[in-house]
Structure formats: structure tokens, C-alpha cells
Image (spheres, coloured by chain):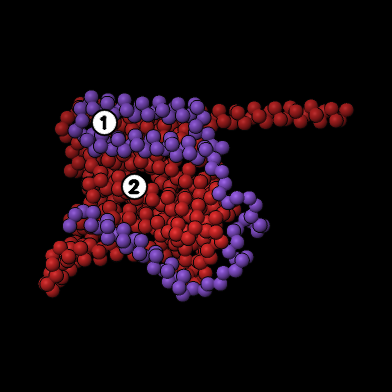
Amino acid sequence: MSEWTFVALLAVISVALPAVPIVAGRLLGPRKPNKEKNATYECGVETVGDTWVQFKVQYYVFALVFLVFDIEVIFLYPWAVAYNQLTLFGVFAGIVFIVTLAEALVYAWRKGALEWV
Amino acid sequence: MGDIFTTISTFLIGLLTGLGVDPLLAHIIVAFLGAFLIANFVLLILIVNIWLERKVIGRMQDRIGPNRVGPWGIFQTIADLTKLVSKEIIIPSGADLVPFMAAPIVAVASVILVWAVMPLAKTAIGTDLNIGVLYMVAVSSLGIMSILLAGWSSNNKYALLGAFRAVAMLVSYEVPMILTLMVPVLLSGSMQMGKIVSDQQIWYGFSMPVAALIFYIALTAEIGRSPFDLLEAESEIVAGYHIEYSGFAFAIFYAAEWAHAFTVSALMAALFFGGWQGPFAETIPTLGIVYFMGKTFLIYFMSMWLRATLPRVRIDHTMSFCWKFLIPMSLILITLVVLVDKLAALAIGESYLDTTTMLAMTPRSLALLAVNLVTGAFAVWWIGVMGRRERERLAALEIKHVVIETSAAGQQAK
């Protein structure tokens, strides 16, 4: 029995546990759809324009910068796990990596990638 | 009676193998029971949590919370959930059914899955994965995906916009969270949650207060609670990404948010405040879970306190606070901590890394505390400088405005 068996069991349970009441609700609960109830909510008026609005590119830029830092941290985790056995040179290697990515943050900052529209 | 977890599991396995069940299957059945117990515990404890929060916030606002339904209103949450179960789940026209129904389930699943690696006591942990911390971060990111699923499938442009905003904010606050999460990993030399907790003879919250603070702020933003609760700012964007949810699907989102708040308090307790460590917790493992729950509830109380006190932060302030303050501070903190710690280790020698007793850990804790206080002072100074610059910029804009006003008024008076 590997250590991931528990995770698999918990995954099955955690999906089944909320799904059961939802299914029960659909089966046992009232179901009276009518045009006004099912209409999309837009502060009480009829909807204007397409639903799938244009995606502002600023959101994409935030996700991109997040991706850079996420990958950086994933590379830093093995270094952190081995940290207690490292020599000073190993620590400096890690710091050079962190400083390179801090430089990337400063670049993104100055270029205006971190401004919110 | 000292170690109920091992007692119960050996008893059950013995019972099942005695009945002729294959030992491997017996282990899997006991693991299944444990998983079922944990999942139910997480969902049922929020009945207590919601009541507690309403009472505590009520008292902080100088009013009594709910007190009609049952003695001191303890059945209020059950009444609310019963009402929600009996309501219709309205599917908006044009909605995409599969992601619409899957979103609340993914939200709850991502919270419950974190408890697989939560160290409840010395001998009670779901599974002590050797990449426990990384697993935890990966799984809690599933919750972010559920928000996008909900917003997209609702066929509602405001839900979609709310979902975009929410995801941008949550994804930004992942970075300081995982950066400061690296600190307990650094100090313990392992990503196993069990080892991180058992190494904390001196709690990491005491030796690394600034890292703990940044982690706590990032977690508060991750769960979308005040002061970062613009994800579902009722007065501003009418519940954001879950506008179109009603009935039990909405109840599941509600439950997922509260369960997430509790899970995050438990994480904070485990990683920075010693988890199940406490007097006699090593010899009597049952006490471990008592200490763990006590610490979790104390941190949860802090969370409620913040919610009752602080106003909402604007979205652009939230984002600039994350990218322009928290992330640089976390990077500077990690660099300084790593440098000073390694130099001190080389200076002091073998005994520096000893984690067996509180006294043995003191030199390291003091060194780390010093680095943290220096970084904290720098952070306070820096945010003062940034604040002053912002105030001067706004004041300059106002002066221009006032000058134009007075000259126009002067001309009119003539």
C-alpha cells in the first residue's frame, strides 16, 4: 500500500461527498423553470451585448509573471530541502538564481506589467 | 489511552484480519475509514465555525449574534443549510451544465484534499508524503480553477468579470505564499509535514516572525477574506463569480469558503506554530490533536478579528501591495536568512543544526530572529517611503485642482 493510496481514497470521497446532496437536491427538490427565473442576472434589466466579453490582456500578463515566479519557486524547493547540507558556495548559487529572478521582477515593474487596469 | 490513533487502527486491522480479510485490503479499508472521517470532520466543523464567527463578530460589533434557534443560537447554521437544501437549483439559460455543476465540487474537493497531509498528532497523519508541502500547494490551486469554471459557465458577463478579477488576485498571492512556505522547508530540510512539525522544539513563528506574517497575509488573501474579500463583495459586484448559483450548489461554495478558512488556519498552526507540539505531546499523542485544534481555533479567531475590524482593500491596491511589496520583501527575506544562517552554521559548527531540544535550537532561532527584525524594520521604513510618495502625488494633484477652482471662482466673483 503506497503512500498515495490515502490521497486516492480521499480524492474519491471528497468528490462524492458534495456530489450526493446536489444530486439528491436535483431529484427531490422543486424544479419549476420559467423564462424569468432562468434569465441571466444583470441588475434587474435585460442583458445587453454578448456574454463572453473581451478578455483584457492585463489579466494574461499577471498570469504570465506569476508563472515565472511559480517555476522559480519549484526550482528553489529542492535547493531548500538540501539547504542544511550545502556549503557556502551552494548557498551563493541559490542566491544568484534568486537575484536573477528579482531582476526580472524589477524589469516587469518598470515596464508597467504590474499595473492594474 | 495515550495513543488512541494507533490503538484504534491496530484494533480494526486485527478485527478485519481475524474475520479472514486479506491484510492489504484490511489496511485499505482502515485508510478509507480514516479518509471518510477526515472529510466529514472538515465539513461538519464548519457548522461550529459559522456559528462561532457570527457570534464573535456580533460581539465585536456590540450586538448579540444569532440567539433564537436553539440555546445561544447553536442550531442557526443547521437551519440555514436546511433552507438552502430545500431551494431549487436554478440553471440559468445558456449555461454550460457540466462545468456549472463541477465548479462547487472541485472547490470543496480541493479543500478536503489538503487534509491528507495535515499532521494532527505524532501518530495521526493521513499520509506523510515526502513532498507534502508541494502537494498541498498544488491541491489548493485547484480551488482557483473552480472559480474560473463557475464564472465561465454561468453565461453572465458579470460573473465572468468577477471570475477574472478573482483569479488574477488569487494567482498573484500564490507567489508570496509559496515563497514564505519555503522557510519551514529550509529550516527542517524536508518537505514532509510530519518532520516540519516534529522539528519545531522552538516554533518557527518565534524565530521567523516576518515570514510568518507574510505567509498569514498571503493566506488571508488566498481564502478571499477581509480585508481582501472583494472576490465576493456583495455591495460591489453582487457576489461575483457565484451570482447564478442557488440552492445547494451555492451552499457548497459557501461551505468551501469556510472550510478553506479553517484549513488555512490549521496550516498556519502546523507550519509556524508547532502543530501538535506542546507539553507531553510526544509521550501522549492524544494530547497532540488537542493542542493542534486549540492553536487552529486561536488563529481562526485572529482571522475573525481581522474581518470584523478592517475595511475592504481596493483591487489595484491589493495587486500593487502583493507585487511591489510582499514579493520583494519575501525575496529579500529569503536571501538574507539563507546567507546569515549559513554563515552562522559555519561559524558555530555541528551543534547549530541540532533540533532535539529547545535549548539546542536557541542559537539558530536567535540568529534568524535578528535577520527577521532587521528585514521587518526595513519593510516598515520602505512602506513609509512608498506611502509618503503616494500621498505627495495625490496632494500635488489636489493642489492643481484647487488652484484652478480658486482662479475660476475669482473670475466669476468679478
| Residue at the disc numbered 1 | B341
Tell which of B400 and B113 is nearer to you. B113
Image position, residue B364 (x, y; %) = 25, 35
**Apparent colour of chain B:** red
Indicate whether B69 appears above or below B274.
below
Q: Quadrant of the N terminus of chain A?
A: bottom left
Please tell me how crowded label 2 is: few (under 14), some (14-19), or many (20+) other residues with Cα within 10 Å. few
Is A77 situated left or right of B74 in this image?
left
Q: Quadrant of the C terminus of chain A?
A: top right
Is A85 situated left or right of B251 in this image?
left
Name the disc covering residue B138, or none. Answer: 2
Asked whether residue B168 appears in the rendered view, the answer is: yes
Q: Residue at x 20, y 41 (%)?
A: B355
Camera-nearest label, 1 or 2: 2
What amino acid is labelled 2 in the image?
Answer: Ala
Distance Cα–Cα, label 1 vs label 2: 29 Å
Q: Residue at x 84, y 27 (%)?
A: B411
What amino acid is labelled 1 in the image?
Answer: Asp
Tell which of A81 and B354 is nearer to you. A81
Q: Residue at x 15, y 32 (%)?
A: B350
Name the disc covering residue B260, or none. Answer: none
Image position, residue B319 (x, y; %) = 50, 39
Image position, residue B314 (x, y; %) = 55, 43
Numbered label tally? 2
Tell which of B238 and A113 is nearer to you. A113
Q: Chain of mark 2?
A: B
**Apparent colour of chain A:** purple
Please tell me how crowded label 1 is: few (under 14), some (14-19), or many (20+) other residues with Cα within 10 Å. some
Tell which of B176 and B45 is nearer to you. B176
Which type of secondary structure does the marked residue at label 1 adopt?
Answer: helix
Indicate whether B18 appears above or below A95.
below
